[in-house]
Amino acid sequence: MQLKFKVPIFDVKNLSFSVRGQDILSKISLEIYNGEYVAIIGPNGGGKTTLIRMLLGLEKPTSGEVRLFGKKLKNFNEWHKIGFVPQRASHVDANFPATVEDIVNMGRVAKRGVFTGFSKEDSQMVHDAMKKMDIVQLKDKMVGTLSGGQRQRTMIARALASSPEILILDEPNTGVDAVSQQRFYKLLSKLNKEENITIVFITHDVGVIADDIGRLFTINQKATICNNPKEALSCEDMTELYGIEAHLLHNHKHEH
Amino acid sequence: MFEMFEYDFMQRAFVAGLFIAVLASISGTFIVLKRYSLMSETLAHSALVGVAVGLVAGYNPLWVAVVVAILSAWLIEYLRSSFSLYSDAILSIILSGSLALAVIIVSLGGAFNNSLFSYLFGSILSVTDEDVITIVIFGSLALALLLMFSKELYFIAYDEEVAQTSGIRVKLLNFLLVTVVAIIIALSIRVVGSLLIGALMVIPTAAALQYRVGFRNTMLISLFFALSSVIFGMTLSYYFSLPSGATIVLSVIAFFVISLVVNKK
């Protein structure tokens, strides 16, 4: 209950989105607080990415309101507090002329004033972000030549370089092998616990929900919020959410 | 070979040409990475409308070309961001529309002559002192803007939406980029010609990309190719009395082919 007195990072009220009369999302209300570790799951086409795009001002809602750190979206200007890693981050154009360091440097661009160059602080933050993601040794490599896991860590390092308070990852595991995924969840959890970075990640894959997730939002046009993900992921919920029998997943969850 | 510099017109052409090489290759890096390559062709044709108006109405064609190219760039950017039209279709419509308009203006004004030919393919003989001054003033301004926002523009070229969610004013900077490109193109048509300037913007970067190096080095390689092409091209133009735009473009294509072969996997 203590949470209620704090200003939420995201405060979403009655958010709806429709395209040509067809509802993609209807009346979504949710709050995400500082320090939380939240997963948003739902089937492909269920509106997860649309929700995130609306939260970030990339898409205009049909109705409803989004507040970021207590401010209305149009008045919000502290974007460096938000680190966003989009879904397509894993499909980098192989020919784009960028080294790992070039990409991570981008994380500092918006923070810098127009007439100021790259400062010592900037380089230090870039280095720290690469160190956290364990990619310092890759800094001169071209992004096109990286493996899926290395690329994923580079994209997150870019987001971390602006020292964000919240990290939003859309389907971060696309094109990443199982071993890298394990390592990735450890990293996220560490960022959440040790650096107090709020984490929101979106996935369509229920099997990857990590144990340390605090809350779970399921999105399929409507949102359901579960405060205790392990108990809430019941067979019925999953069947309703995905429209398929989900007993295998259910068993899998209980093995842990 | 240095005897050519004894002539004033060659000195002017070289100052203008080298300046244009710097402008075209640096702005070209962003244009190519943003997949705006066709944009440079379109703006060059729009600039031609300005040249036509200038020739017929008796104003300095270069100045009118700058204005018309900027207006055209804004129109393209507005259509691209406000309507759900394919951007290459928009570019193609404006490209042919501009050319048609330019030809009609020139025909009605009875100015279809050598002077227009030089604006189409470039001519080292036609560069005046006034042109050099115009190129240096506007060009310096354009270059300063590009360099000031190069990190932002690079980020936008990499991923427009992530740049936006990082707090970068993407729409404004996109307008700035197309405006700067419009200015550069309009300034370049004296030396390179409106039908060929697109090549000087796009090909040096396309060649530099073959080396698969980071952003800074890609830009430097592109700059080197553009400068070398202008030097070779203008020298060939002088000795063989050929339109400078054509010899410059063939030189830059030679660099492109060499880069392709050298970097073949």
Image (cartoon, rainbow, N blue to C red):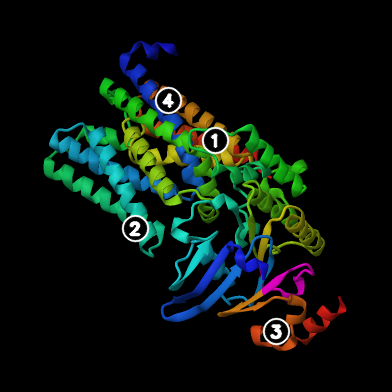
Q: Real-space Cα distance between discs 4 and 2? A: 34 Å
Residue B79, disc: 2
A67 to A156, vertically: above or below? below
Q: Real-space Cα distance between discs 3 and 4? A: 65 Å
Instruction: Identify the residue under disc 4.
Output: B18
Residues tagged 3 and 4 counted as in contact (Cβ below 8 A): no
| Residue at screen point 21% across, 49% down | B101
Instruction: Identify the residue under disc 3.
Output: A238
Along the polypeptide, which appears first: circle 4 or circle 1? 4
Q: Real-space Cα distance between discs 1 and 3? A: 51 Å
Q: Mark 2, mark 1: which one is toward the viewer?
A: 2
Q: Real-space Cα distance between discs 2 and 1? A: 29 Å
Q: Real-space Cα distance between discs 4 and 1? A: 16 Å
- Locate residue A171 relative to residue A235 in the image: left or right: left
The type of residue carrying mark 3 is Met
**Mark 3 belongs to which subunit?**
A
Residue A236 is situated, as x and y percent measured from the top left of the image, at 71, 89
Q: Mark 2, mark 3: which one is toward the viewer?
A: 3
